[in-house]
Image (cartoon, rainbow, N blue to C red):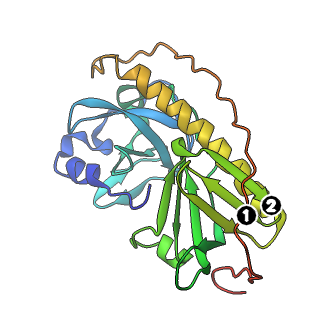
């Protein structure tokens, strides 16, 4: 999620025999993955397959990054819960990458909203820059904080989303214990957020079901074949109406201007 560290690059730099420019030239067609596709990647560091790989970037021309020659067609893969990345050259694809049975995540969503803050002394609306990605909702006090290493103001694993309630420009989100209220500048934006939330709930539940199935299987580095897994369909929960918190008029302000 937030703050990807390129630890695999350090490993590759210390093992020049594994650098992509030393590999034999490509002699046959191999499958090249597109940016955003989910894959499984074999890691030389711990000698095992990581099931949470994602193609972050594909280069069309040869480049150099941190002293490593990256040939055209190479794919930058993020994995290990977002903590590791490495480049995979076309010649390495068949050995290091394989298709993943995981579902493709819904598009991420981010934007600036207002959040109702309940306080015994000064309840009211505060700015909240939200980020919805891969089944997790996070928010900060501003979009500048969300782009930095500033700790989040709040977060919600959407596996715990119980219900939502929409009313005009306001959207309430409940995990069964706490109710979070966000306000947008127009109704369509609140509707888009609600629809995106439930799409990410479905994705998060599919990933959980897949992990439950995979936990009973052996993850062998030598195994390069997969038996496709069928996941049960996830039904969207019916949102129950919840009484909205008393609201006052507040201007919606986007980061960088009114």
Q: Quadrant of residue 68?
A: bottom left
Q: Are marks 1 and 2 in contact (CB under 8 Å)?
A: yes
The reply to whether residue 100 is visible in this rendering is no
Q: Position of residue 22 (x, y in %)?
A: 27, 41
- Secondary-structure class at tag 2: strand
Q: Position of residue 93 (x, y in %)?
A: 41, 31
- Whole-angstrom CA distance, mark 1 to mark 2, is 8 Å
Q: Earlier in the sequence, mark 1 or mark 2?
A: 2
Q: Residue at x 28, y 60 (%)?
A: 67
Q: Quadrant of the N terminus?
A: bottom left
Decide if residue 52 is in sight here: yes
Identify the residue at the far left of this view: 14
Q: Horizontal and vertical percent for residue 187? A: 83, 64
Q: Between 85 and 192, which is closer to the camera in this rendering?
A: 192
Q: Is residue 113 left or right of residue 213?
A: right
For label 2, the residue is 167
Q: Which image quarter: residue 233?
A: top right
Q: Position of residue 248 (x, y in %)?
A: 74, 81
Q: Residues within 10 Å of mark 1 (few under 14, many from 20)?
A: some
Q: Residue at x 43, y 39 (%)?
A: 53
Q: Which residue is at the front of the view, 76 or 40? A: 40
Residue drawn at the location 50% of the way across and 33% of the way down: 207
Say which residue appears at 77% left-offset and 82% top-offset.
249
Q: Which mark is residue 244?
A: 1
């Amino acid at each position: 999620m937030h703050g990807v560290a390129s630890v695999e690059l350090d490993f590759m730099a210390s093992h020049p025999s594994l650098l992509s420019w030393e590999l034999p030239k490509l002699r046959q067609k191999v499958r090249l993955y597109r940016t955003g596709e989910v894959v499984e990647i074999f890691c030389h560091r711990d000698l095992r397959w990581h099931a949470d790989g994602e193609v972050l970037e594909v280069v069309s021309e040869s480049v150099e990054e941190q002293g490593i020659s990256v040939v055209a067609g190479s794919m930058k893969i993020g994995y290990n819960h977002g903590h590791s990345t490495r480049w995979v050259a076309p010649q390495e694809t068949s050995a290091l990458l394989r298709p993943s049975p995981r579902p493709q995540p819904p598009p991420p969503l981010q934007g600036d909203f207002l959040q109702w803050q309940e306080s015994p002394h000064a309840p009211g609306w505060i700015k909240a820059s939200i980020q919805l990605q891969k089944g997790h909702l996070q928010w900060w006090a501003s979009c500048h904080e969300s782009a930095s290493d500033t700790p989040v103001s709040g977060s919600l694993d959407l596996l715990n989303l119980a219900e939502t309630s929409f009313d005009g420009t306001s959207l309430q989100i409940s995990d069964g214990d706490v109710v979070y209220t966000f306000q947008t500048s127009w109704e369509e934006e609140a509707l888009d957020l609600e629809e995106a939330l439930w799409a990410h709930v479905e994705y998060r539940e599919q990933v959980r079901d897949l992990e439950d199935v995979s936990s009973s299987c052996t993850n062998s580095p030598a195994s390069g074949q997969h038996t496709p897994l069928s996941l049960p369909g996830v039904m969207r929960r019916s949102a129950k109406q919840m009484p909205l918190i008393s609201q006052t008029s507040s201007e919606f302000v986007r980061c960088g201007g009114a």
